[in-house]
Amino acid sequence: MVLVKHKSWAEPYKIKVVEPLFITTREFREKVIAEAGYNTFLLRSEDVYIDLLTDSGTSAMSDRQMAGLMLGDEAYAGSRNFYHMEDAIRKYYGYKYVVPTHQGRGAEHIMSSILIKAGDFIPGNMYFTTTKLHQELAGGVFVDVIVDDAHDPNSLFPFKGNVDLNKLESVIKKEGANKIPYVAIATTVNMAGGQPISLENLRAVRELTSRYGIRIIHDMTRVAENAFMIKMREEPFKDWSVAEIVKEICSLTDGATMSAKKDALVSIGGFLAVNDEFVFEEARNMVVIYEGLHTYGGMAGRDMEAMAIGIEESVQFDHMHARIGQVHYLGQKLIEFGIPIVRPLGTHGVFLNAKEFLPHIPQENFPAQTLAAEIYIDSGVRSMERGIVSAGRDSTTGEHRFPELELVRLTIPRRVYTQAHMDVVAESVQSVFETRQGINGLKMVYEPKHLRFFQARFEKK
Ligand code: P70
């Protein structure tokens, strides 16, 4: 194959099926966002124009994946599609044993219950909401050991997903290796802005944890995106393929949980994978209680077939180049407009810095929640709060946690929108930015006990 190098990337596909979009009026949007308690999770999808809530389960399938759906073997036990999926996981990720689950949090539940006991500590490269909750429900305490740069939206450090090795070693020395069932490593780090960890850093984490006999459990939800960033930014790996880097990352860890709704390009699905036979046996026992039989774990045969194909597509260079290229296209536009965003740009979305966008709104009045609602009102673009509402309350004091990062995430589904959609999004954010002085904060009027951001309700202050 002759590779012609151009300055621009283009999508490595053409469009075969389209889904119409509808634009509503500002008056209508003001009404429905108020009815939704100013929470974008509570909007009806049909009232949304461009949906950048999440990249989870929202990507477009390829024609090969669609054909795979027709090959679904919906037998209760031993579906042929399970074995295809297991083969793909072994081939591209290298883990030995696979237990399917309905999505990522199903795998987190099982992994946390098996490995964590009351009083344990789990150091990790920044929390993720569902992951941390399952660690806590199993009796553990999450300890953030990510580099300080990750908490600074203006730091240009290229690997904000890196672990601070000194922080990690201090936790091990303070709590004792026997109180640390594993170190949790995410590729990429969602809450930091979709930021990658470097291979050099991961190798150092492996070396340190091996010295203390501690496992590494890998949240591999966006591992191929992380691998692409390593290829682009980490000199020694520039000639490695995305697939080779993915395999190398996985080989440095002992097991993984996966939400296949992201990298692996399916609407629903997940799994946990381990190399340790004991953990595998335990997980196989648990999966039948909470998810389904060990050869489907909550997925239909057709979902598993689509996942097997999606895993292979996810490590293709052209796919990743266009996927991350589109995220960076939007980010670059916003930078040119002078909008405060997290830099360097990450992989699955652009993260607006609500503290700088709305400096007159104190964090207890939810600047990111407010900004997400305002963007929806302006254009019907749906985004997601990733700040104080997502951080929840401290499990001992019951007070709000006040995270450094108060962000609004514009998350890009894979292979779904065009650059023209990105232009409209950027222009909408710009118009909200121009009128920011007139925007006031919110007060919370309903707060669920767990993962409050999903269902909390707000009113204008
Ligand atoms: C998102 C989604 C899911 C996710 C993840 C990482 C790094 C695990 C999971 C859980 C969906 C979501 C979840 C919680 C809050 C908001 C949104 N992330 N690890 O939009 O996987 O959803 O399959 O159970 O990003 O970022 P799953």
Image: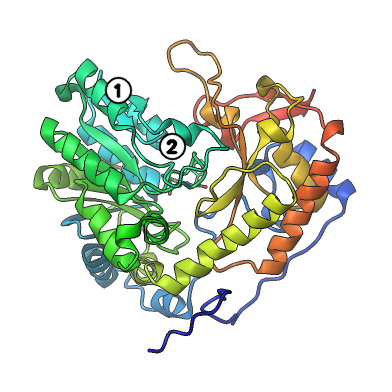
93 relative position to 3: left or right: left
Residue 36 seen in render: no
Number of marks in picture: 2
Q: Is mark 2 within 8 Å of ligand 1?
A: yes
Query: What number is the disc on residue 128?
Result: 2
- The residue that mark 1 highlights is 139
Question: At label 1, which amino acid type do we have?
Answer: Gly
> How many residues crowd mark 1 within 10 Å: few (<14), some (14–19), many (20+)?
some
Question: At label 2, which amino acid type do we have?
Answer: Phe
- In this view, the mark in front (2 or 1): 2
Is 312 drawn above or below residue 171 in the view shown? Answer: below
Residue 357 seen in render: yes
**Residue under the point 81% across and 60% down:** 23
What colour scheme does the image use? rainbow
Q: Relative to the observer, which residue lies in front, 460 or 374?
A: 374
Residue furthest to the top: 397
282 relative position to 166: left or right: left
Is 456 drawn above or below residue 319 in the view shown? Answer: above
Q: Relative to the observer, which residue lies in front, 210 or 410?
A: 210
